[in-house]
Amino acid sequence: MLGTPVCDFLGIRCPIIQGGMAYLAGPELVAAVSNAGALGTLGAGYLPPDWVEELISRTRALTDRPFAVNIMPHSPHIEAVLEVVIEEKAPVVALGGGDPTQCLPVLKAGQVKVMPVVSSVAAARRMEQLGADAVVVEGMESGGHIGDVTTMALVPQVVDAVRIPVIAAGGIADGRGLVAALALGAQAVQVGTRFVCTRECAAHPRFKERMLEAGGCATRVIGRSTGRPVRCLDTELIRQILEMEKGGQTVDHYFGAGKLHTAAVEGNVEDGFVMAGQAVGLVREMMTAEEVVQQMMNEAEMTINALTRRLAS
């Protein structure tokens, strides 16, 4: 078993955290991941407080293991949602997009463990100063909204810059990626895309099918002109948006119209955004969440053993 200090801190056996994907990471997936010894994360996103409370309650009915809740600091409901996660004694909160300056002290005062997502060394240092317990360092290989530095380059820089645990994210979908992240100094990995194609994930079947069919080199980045780039699977809509950006046309209206919901919940993968990371090419079959966790751990141990033999020869 590959235990690390952050595993002990979070109360998990495996250094794997399932990403809190909006619309996709519901109680069934989260509980299955946590029951497998990793850390499941609810995708609360911008949901109102009563919905968040219900999700936490439903998750607790399915597992007695620790889990996290992913919330967005710039949610219009943020103050009420913070009250809910504190009152419900959520074990861990992951802070997604937006400035978490106001959220972090409130959560820490409520005895909640906090893991902000960052995409730069400067942001990681700032989160440490504000009292974060760990940082999720997300490289540009990830799906959805991205930064501009790769996981391979960013993680060791952050490891050198902060004292709190670093969790690597972006482009990780198997045990080899887990070992690579540990070698870079991370204490765990966050995995999103691989958990989409699990039986417990709430994504529409067509959304999952498109990912399984994707193969390598299947993602494109749109929205650079808006300042908030997004990585999605390559579709006709994505190519149209890229051409519009290339021609200097505004594409802002595409990014506030629930395009992820269109694809992930409604199953309209042609008119929506199928957000996926570059590791989607490693996602080749539907599995249970427990199988994903166990396979990653087995692959990690096999990779370490093979590497040890190779270096000794």
Image (cartoon, rainbow, N blue to C red):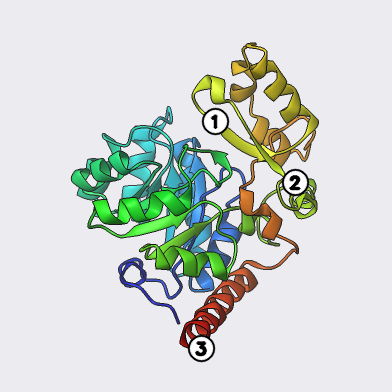
- Residue positioned 24% across, 41% down in the render: 126
Frontmost of labels 3 and 1 is 3
Q: Which residue is mark 3?
A: 313
Q: Earlier in the sequence, mark 1 or mark 2?
A: 2
Secondary structure state at the residue bearing disc 1: loop
Per the rendering, the mark at residue 229 is: 1
Quarter of the image with the N terminus is: bottom left
Q: Give the mark, 2 or 3, whose residue is nearer the N terminus.
A: 2
Element type where label 3 sits in the image: loop
Q: CA distance from mark 2 to mark 3?
A: 45 Å
- Label 3 and label 1: CA atoms lie apart by 45 Å
- Amino acid type at image mark 3: Ser
Crowdedness near tag 1: few (<14), some (14–19) or many (≥20) residues, C-alpha within 10 Å: some
Residue 35 in view here: yes
Amino acid type, callout 2: Phe
Residue marked by disc 2: 207
